[in-house]
Structures are given as C-alpha cells and as structure tokens.
Image (spheres, rainbow, N blue to C red):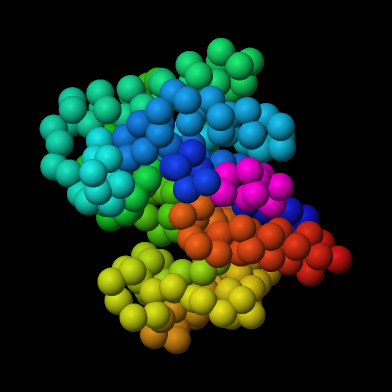
Amino acid sequence: MSTIDINSDLGEGIGNDEAIMPYITSCNIACGGHAGDLSSMQETLLLAQQYKVKIGAHPSFPDRENFGRKTMHLSDSELKESILSQVSALSHAAGSLGLSLHHIKPHGALYNQAAKDPALAKTIVGIIKDHFKELTLFAPPGSALLKEGKQQGITVWTEVFADRNYREDLSLVPRSEANAVIHEEKEVLSHLKNMLCERKVKTINHQWIPITADTICVHGDNPHAVSLARNIHNFIHGTLQS
C-alpha cells in the first residue's frame, strides 16, 4: 500500500496540537459544540496551513459540559441547526484565512450514536449533502453512518483506530469495558498492520473480521498522543512503504 491518511482531533484545548501536526495528514477541529471558539479555530487552522494538513470540522452535540461525550435527544431541527452552525463557523474562519475544509467528522457521542442509529445517520448525511456536498465524511467501518453516506452518494472515508479493540460488528469496545484500549506499542502496530495490510481485524473475542481503512485516528486528548502519532507515522512511512 502506498499511503494512508492519519487524522487527529485538535483545537480542543489540550495543548499538544503543534507537536502532533508533523505526524498527521488531516485534522478535525473542534468548532464550538464540545470545545473550541473562534480564537482556537483560527490558531489550529494556521497550524494546519503551516504543516500542510487537510482541515476538517469536528461537530458534536452542543454539550461543552460533558465534552460532547453524552448522548443528547434533540429534535431534528435542533440538531441540524447546531451542526450547521458549528461547521459554518469553521468554514468561515478558514475562508477568512484563504483556506477551505476537506472533511467532516462527528465527535464523541454524536459519532458513536450515528454509527448505530440509521435515523441520526440520515440526518447528518443529509446536512452534508444539502450544505457541504464537496466535503468528505469520516465514518466508522460497518456503521449506519458509513452505509447512509454511500447510499446518498457523498464521499466517505472509513476511519479506524490503531489503539482500540473492536467487536464482531466492527463497533469499538466501549471505554467502560476492560481491554477497550491497546496500550503496548508493539500490539498497536501489529493491530494496525493487520488492518492495513491484511485488511482484517482481530476482535476482542479473537475472531478475524474483514475491515478496510482510509484514515487512522489518533486522539489528541490521549496522554501519549504525540508518541503514538509519531510511531504510526514512522511505521506507515517505513514498513508499509518499504
């Protein structure tokens, strides 16, 4: 395989954005729902420009108190208004700097809920198709969000996580359960190599399931995010391209 995208969730006030930038090719910028404001968006946009990193919006449920990690039961119109407001804010900030967006990746509970809720997935994809049809959607493998995006004809990239274990339906093992996160670097890279080279993943129950990947996520709020991003970058540009 020649190359693959590496993305990270940034602009969330963690403080390591610039340290991660050299090792990624796409960034997902918080745009006011769970974190972020005009100042942080502009700062992250300028870093993305400096490091030639593709820019994406990272909208969430409007829930700064819980960092967007709690499911909210909004009406269709409320959700549309919130997502439109968030993505438009980042788009306008980017435009003022002569930059443009490449993709949209929902955050936290919005991402996880849309992966299994066809109605929510349809709402999100509909917003993209109606207002941001030139943008790519990042979605988890085997998800309702991925299926809806492809069905409605928008561009979709399948996103995988190098340091997370999967279930047989290709959903992530919840962080509340044991062994949700892979901590050992050798295991992370082995897990990643299986997904990228063999196109299969070993699930938490030791079953091998086919999987495809267009982009790999490194969470910016992971305490080892910079090291993990660097190791994945070196692995891809060494082992996979040698």
Residue under the point 27% across and 40% down: 64
* Residue 139 image point, x, y percent: 44, 49
Using residue 138 as the reference point, say whether residue 85 is left or right of it: left
- Of residues 127 and 178, which is closer to you in this image? 178
Pinpoint residue 63: horizontal percent, then vertical percent: 24, 40
Residue sitting at 36 percent across and 27 percent down? 86
Q: Quadrant of residue 206?
A: bottom left
- Residue 18 colored magenta? yes
38 up-or-down from 166: above or below:
above
Locate residue 218, reporting x and y percent. Answer: 54, 57
Q: Residue at x 13, y 32 (%)?
A: 75
User: Magenta residues: mostly which secondary structure?
Assistant: helix
Q: Is residue 228 above or below residue 86?
A: below
Residue at the right extreme of this rendering = 242
- The reply, left or right, for residue 237 in relation to residue 213 is right
> Is 99 placed left or right of 127 in the picture?
right
Seen in the picture, residue 27 relative to 182 is either above or below; the reply is above
Answer with the quarter of the image where residue 96 lies: top right
> Vertically, is 81 above or below 239?
above
Looking at the rendering, the stretch of residues picked out in magenta corresponds to 16-25
**Is 82 included in the stretch rendered in magenta?**
no
Determine if residue 129 is in view. Answer: no
